[in-house]
Image (cartoon, rainbow, N blue to C red):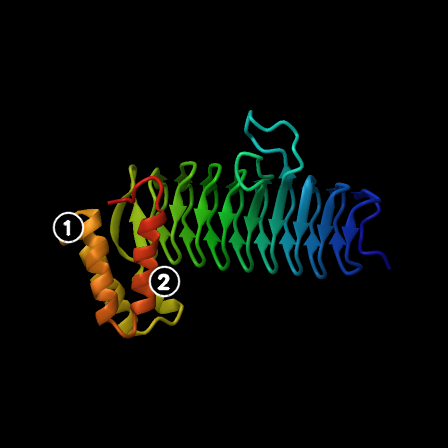
């Protein structure tokens, strides 16, 4: 029995694994590829040069792979790439990339994307993230693994959010957020280390203590940013359990492009 509802419109050029399910009134465009086990609910549109991995779940009324909301886009064959095991809830929008960046918007694996979330052109989202309802990314935003964006958080274009960071509800984010840091407010301000999230992901007490020490050097020592980088390098050398985590914070400071929330 076919797993494509008779009311769905699937272009003959689209490449769908035989196990893919497509619900009523959904539309799949000619340049779309969808991997095994993925379920496309009713009234979903997947278009553009879009590649979807395996075991994803698209809920009703998603718009996936539409043209970027960027006046510079002139119809170039840019792409959207979605990994495996993602849950993408109602009314989510994900746009293609633009030629002004890498030409591709990416979503990794095992992400929970709640209703009304927008991932704009050229965003690069890692794996195991959580986006609560109405979290919005402008173009060119990078989000690291295990980051969490609370409801109605809004992120300015070109911002970077480090791994394991936490963005609070209604936060207006216009600068970069280092790994492990919790920020909230409008404008955003640092509130500490995302300790609860780290505990849930199995970080040891020694690791968390090392990350907290690094946070204090960056935010509570009165050091300039350059001085803090040097201090983090020294702390990395002293720490056994958290050396890799402190290195991640230090290296993030080297690629932050909009200045960090500080």
Residue at 49% from the left image edge and 55% from the top image edge:
126
- Numbered mark located on residue 197 in the image: 2
Secondary structure beneath disc 1? loop
Which residue is tagged 1?
Answer: 223
Residue 62 seen anywhere in this rendered image of the structure: no
**Cα–Cα gap, marks 2 and 1:** 27 Å
Residue at 21% from the left image edge and 48% from the top image edge:
225
Residue 12 seen anywhere in this rendered image of the structure: yes
- Tell me: 133 left or right of 56: left
Secondary structure beneath disc 2? helix
**Residue most extreme to the left:** 222
Query: Residue 234: which quarter of the image?
Result: bottom left
Residue 130: image location, x then y, percent: 47, 54
Residue 45: image location, x then y, percent: 69, 41
**Residue most extreme to the right:** 1
Placement of 124 over or under 38, stated as above or below:
above
Placement of 239 over or under 132, stated as above or below:
below
Query: Residue 147: which quarter of the image?
Result: bottom left
Depth order, front residue of 23/106: 106
């Amino acid at each position: 029995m076919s797993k494509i509802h008779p009311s769905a419109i699937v272009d003959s050029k689209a490449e769908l694994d035989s196990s893919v399910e497509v619900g009523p009134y959904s539309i799949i465009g000619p340049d779309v590829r969808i991997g095994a086990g993925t379920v496309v609910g009713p009234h979903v549109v997947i278009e553009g040069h879009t590649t979807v991995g395996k075991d994803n779940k698209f809920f009703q009324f998603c718009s996936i792979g539409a043209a970027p909301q960027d006046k510079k886009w002139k119809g170039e064959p840019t792409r959207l790439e979605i990994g495996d095991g993602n849950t993408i809830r109602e009314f989510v929008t994900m746009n293609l990339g633009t030629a002004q960046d890498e030409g591709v918007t990416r979503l990794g694996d095992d992400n929970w994307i709640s209703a009304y979330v927008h991932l704009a052109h050229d965003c690069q989202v890692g794996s195991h993230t959580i986006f609560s309802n109405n979290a919005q990314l402008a173009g060119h935003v990078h989000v690291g693994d295990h980051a969490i964006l609370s409801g109605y958080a809004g992120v300015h274009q070109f911002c970077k959010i480090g791994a394991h960071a936490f963005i609070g509800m209604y936060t207006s984010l216009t600068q970069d957020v280092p790994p492990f840091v919790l920020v909230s407010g409008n404008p955003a301000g640092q509130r500490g280390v995302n300790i609860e999230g780290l505990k849930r992901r199995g970080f040891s007490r020694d690791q968390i203590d090392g990350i907290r020490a690094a946070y204090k050097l960056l935010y509570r020592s009165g050091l300039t940013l350059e001085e803090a980088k040097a201090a983090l390098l020294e702390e990395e050398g002293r720490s056994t359990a958290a050396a890799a985590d402190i290195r991640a914070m230090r290296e993030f400071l080297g690629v932050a492009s909009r200045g960090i929330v500080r």
